[in-house]
Structure formats: C-alpha cells, structure tokens
Image (tube, rainbow, N blue to C red):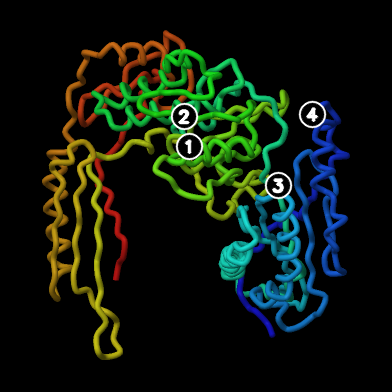
Amino acid sequence: MESKRAHRRCKVKPVEVENDAKRPKNNRVAQEDELTDNFGADSQLKLNENVSLLTTKSIFPIKTYRIKNEKETESDVDLTQFFQQCENDITEILTHWIGDFKSIKFNLKIFGLYVKTTEKEEKYKINKHFVAPYISIYDVESIAKQLNQALETLIPLCGAFQDEDPDWTLENYQYLEMTVVKLEHTSYTVGLVPTPRSLQTRCTLINVKNNDDFCFKWSILAYIAYRKIKNCTFENHLAKQNAIAKLESHDHYQVSDISEDIIEYDMFILNFTGIKFPITRECISLFESNNKYISINIFEVDDDDTSLVVQTIKSKEIRSHSIDLLALRNEEKHLVHYAYMACKMKPNENNIIRDAKKCKKDVINPEEISKMKFTSFSKKISPPVVIFASIKKMANQKDEEPQACAALFYIVHQYNPDLNEICFFEGVDCIKRFGLQLKTKTSELFHKAWTPKNPIDALTECERNYQMNGSCCACEEKMTTNERKKLFNTFTGKYVGPIHKACKITYSLAEPFFPVIFDEIV
C-alpha cells in the first residue's frame, strides 16, 4: 500500500534530545535534581519492548518516550491505524503520570520515512517528523479525548507535507515520540519578577509591584479593581491605559494589612483562612473552597517568554468570578511571581521558524501556524474604511456549477462607526449589481474618507506626559528628546503619540486603497 502525496524537498533537522551533561552546573540545577529524580522514578511504570525512555534527567520535570510498532504491517502508511496500534502504550504512560501528579501536559511527534526516485532511478530518502502542540490533562477520563485531539492535529500536518511534491512517497511511519511535562508548581520563592518586554504589548497584565510574599493576594485585588476600569468610559485609550497602570502600585489598594486572613475590598470579602504564603497548589484549592464564588486558573509562558503555554492549575468549575493569573518566573534567582491577566495573549508575530537562516536564501520554510511580520511600520496603520463582502451560491438541479444567488458588502468606517452601511443584492444578476454599487461607493468614499484632517495641537495632561516619556508609537523603541516628534492621525487629526523623527517620514499610508475582504467567492 503506497501513499503518493507530495511535499517540498527541504533539509530536515534530526530530533535532538537535550542532555543536562551539556549544561553548566549551577545552584539552580542542583536544586532541581532532586525534583527531577522524583519525577523520573519509573520503577512503577513497566515499559515493554515497544517503549523506550529517551530522557533520564533535565532541569525541568520532563520525560520523553519513544513508542514503536514492532509489527510491520500495511497500516504503517496509515497514520490513524499506526496510532491505534501504539495507543495502549501511550495511554499507559499518561495514566501513570496523571495518577502521580494530578496534572500534566504532553505533545506527540510522528516520524516518517519518505522515498523519492529520480528519472535516473536514483533513490533518495528523507526522515521527517511532525509535532502536535502541548495538550494539558487533568484527569484519566480525558486522556482518550486529548489523544484524539493530538491525532487530528497530526493528520493534516502529514498531508500538507506530502501535498506539495508528487514525487515523494511515504515508505512507512517509524515511531512516535511523546514528551510528558509535570504541571506542578515547584518550590520557588516568591519575589517581584518584572513583566517581560515581549509580553507588554501582547496582553493586559497587571503586575502589582509588592515587596512581600502576598503577590497572589495582590493579584486578586487587581482583578477586583480592574472590573471598575473595564466598565468605565474614558476620554481616550491613553487615559484608560494610565488608569490600568496605577493598579500596579500596591499603594493604590489602600489595604490596612495585606497579611490578614479576611480582607474586605470594594464589596468583596476574601477569606484566606488556613492559607500559607508563599502559596502552594493545595492552598489555591483551599482559597477556592473558602470563597465559593471565585475560581482560579494559573497560566505560564514558554521558555522564551513569548507565548502562552497551558494552564498549570485549572479550576474544576466555572464560577461567577473566574480569575486568570500568570506565573512569571525568574529562573536564575529561582523566583515566581503572580500577576493578574486581564485578557489572554495576542498571537506572537515573531513566531517564525528559528533556524530559517540555515535554509537557502531564496527559500524560507516557516513553521505551521506561524506568522510573518512586516518590516515597514506603516503596514500597521489601518485605512479609514474596510469593506467585508460575501457571495452565496446555490446548486442547480442539473449537474452544473453552482450559481451565485445573493451578494452583499458591509462598509466599516474605522473612525466613525455611525457611517457604517450594508448593501445587499439577490437574483440572477446579483454579481453585476454588486460590482457596480461597490465601484460607486468606493468612488464616493475616496473623497470623504481619504481627506486629511488638520491636527489637534492641544494636548491633555496625560497626552503631554505620554509625549515626554513614551516610546515611539511606530517602532516601539525608546528615544531621546532631540528625536522626539508628535504624531497625529491623518484621518481624524487626533494625537496618536510620540514618534522618532526618522519613523515619522515613512509612518503613513502612501496611496489610497480600500481593502475588500471576502469570506466566500464562487
């Protein structure tokens, strides 16, 4: 049984299993060794001949297993059947660790061998692996569901790899590798950890600057205080940001004694009875028991502080007040600090494959679900009008191509939503009328929306402070007084922020245009 899907020929990096022997030993590693040995106690986990342990030690509580299918069958080219033959071994490993540590995360890699025969009858072989992202598990009952989710992720990845070059043939799937990570808070000391720069513009994070062991308490108070700001109306976005920034000072909360077991704040009565600080996983559960209307979820970021990983602590039920906290870590000082996460992270625009420089100059192979970033800052500027369009089709009774039966476009004004309008057409000539009306509307909008407005020079006190101390609103870098200029919105005349003199030259939309975004085209 052969599979003749295609893929782009590229260099494939072999899987490397990191070894601590290559790492310089320091105090932190020595402190982690005991923790790792406990996680690595496989004495109760009996591995059969199909399973091998690849990692034995790490500075993190982590295990990597290789699972093979010793019986070579035709199903070795069918990922679903290959996975099913390995599923019992995978389930046994996950069941073991979820039983010991209550919550874990895992990812799966599938390794395949592909063959290509040239016109000269020369054969080339290439090994390729595909990776499903980490998935968290909190109970044994959810293992089957999460494994199915991982499989559903791997199948299209394998298909996309082969669909780009018909000359490659899948010879067989060789084995699976599974990495298991313990979602258990280690014995860190609580201390202030600044918000990483990479996260500052990607999520609303309230990181209270406290000098005690009660960052968990301060984060709960930050949630309560943020509720007011969220429901308030501000003069502009800058005023709202300044109000949020004030929540990072512990003096803002005016709590007489943060160490008390019962804290009353803004109509909330928080019960911390029986909870020891620095707080542990068990004490977080106790806090939920003491406060029946609050649920706590703890998140962490990846090693380079750029993207959200998984929930290390997940509440068992959704309550009226669900609070998401982010555990910020300083690995060198062995510190952990909790901050209130008012909103989840935005996608990381810099998540481009890290070894792209090793590829050929004219070929770059980005990772799956990655994003590219414009080198020109002006690409971040939104045009004054965006048009969303949709064309619906209807199948005929005969075996003919479906025909358009209705069409519409929705004009969205970026700076004046009151002017938004929708145009709808139906019938056999809907496409013709759609095109004519779209042309008419864009001609009218050119004269209305693209007319520059005079700048509003009068700044508020908050805007003046932002102009003197803020970073460049284009490149987001710091700047000196001499190179600091004011930027005003071309279409509204309102103040935007400080900008480098050099950035201001190119930070504009060069030519008028109206993007039209279709959700479906016949």
Between tags 1 and 3, which lies in front?
1
Between 462 and 216, which is closer to the camera in this rendering?
A: 216
The local crowd at label 4, few if under 14, some if 14 to 19, many if 20 or more residues have their Cα within 10 Å, is few
Mark closest to the chain's N terminus, 1 or 2: 2
Tell me the amino acid under the disc marked 3.
Answer: Lys
Q: Position of residue 218 (x, y in %)?
A: 50, 24
Mark closest to the chain's N terminus, 2 or 4: 4
Mark closest to the chain's N terminus, 1 or 3: 3
Between 104 and 361, which is closer to the camera in this rendering?
A: 104
**Which mark is drawn over residue 182?**
3
Tell me the amino acid under the disc marked 2.
Answer: Leu
Quadrant location of the N terminus? bottom right
Query: Is disc 3 in contact with disc 4, using a CB cutoff of under 8 Å?
Result: no
Is residue 117 visible in the rendered structure shown here? no
Is residue 304 visible in the rendered structure shown here? yes
Q: CA distance from mark 2 to mark 4?
A: 35 Å
Q: Tell me what residue is drawn at x 18 percent, y 68 percent.
A: 431
Q: Measured along the vertical axis of the image, is residue 2 above or below residue 92? A: below
- The residue under label 1 is 291
Query: Is disc 1 in contact with disc 2, using a CB cutoff of under 8 Å?
Result: yes
Q: Say what secondary structure mark 3 lies in.
A: strand
Q: CA distance from mark 1 to mark 2?
A: 7 Å
